[in-house]
Image (spheres, helix red, strand yellow):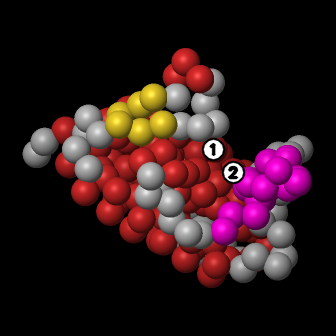
Amino acid sequence: MDDKAVLLKYLRARRGELLAKLDGLDEYDVRRPMTPTGTNLLGLVKHVASVELGYFGEVFGRPSGRDLPWFADDAEPDADLWVPQEESREEIIELHRFSAEHSDATIESLPLDAPGEVPWWPEERRRVTLHQILVHMCVETAQHLGHADILRELIDGSAGKGPGT
């Protein structure tokens, strides 16, 4: 397996584990604010899917065409980390799947040394390669999976990769 295949395998595994954190929970528990800023499990799925669309879309000139109003200049701070009532669980799960498909298409179609530019990063760090962004998203997804693991444990005591992860 080459480097890209290994990294993509890890990213896909972490995505699946993150989505599994919702399994067996009702609407209240997936939306329940678990931090002072309102972060909840469904919000973490929304956040990871959203940033992935940016990193594997905009950065490499492959915009998804998906409107993400929680990233608008006039949006509430951290609006991508919580889910209001007008956004359904099904919509967020569909966003996660759409994001994964769009990202995978970018990853599979470009070489690891493909250049990109992250417009929201400082000027001196903006120029990147697909390899850098793939590693970045593996790390970011794993970080948020850890957050989700803690939130899930606080909700019902389950932790790790077992049933109800």
Height in image: 46 above or below 142?
A: below
Residue occupying the far left of the picture: 1
- Relative depth, front residue between 90 and 159: 90
Mark 2 to mark 1 CA distance (whole Å): 6 Å
Element on which disc 1 rests: helix
Height in image: 45 above or below 84?
A: above
At a point 69% along the width and 64% down the height, the residue shown is: 68
Residue type at the position of mark 2 = Leu
Query: Callout 1: few (<14), some (14-19), or many (20+) C-alpha neighbours within 10 Å?
Result: some
Confirm or deny contact between disc 2 and disc 1 (CB under 8 A).
Answer: yes
Point out residue 76 in the picture as x, y percentages from the top left corner. 88, 53
- The residue indicated by pointer 2 is 151
Point out residue 55 in the picture as x, y percentages from the top left corner. 50, 47
Q: How many numbered discs sit on the rendered protein?
A: 2
- Relative depth, front residue between 141 and 108: 108
The mark found on residue 110 in the picture is none
Left or right position of 25 against 4: right
Left or right position of 23 against 106: right
Left or right position of 164 against 41: left
- The residue indicated by pointer 1 is 147
Q: Give the residues drawn in magenta, as a range.
A: 67-82
Point out residue 90 in the picture as x, y percentages from the top left corner. 62, 81
Residue type at the position of mark 1 = His
Classify the position of the N terminus by image quarter.
top left
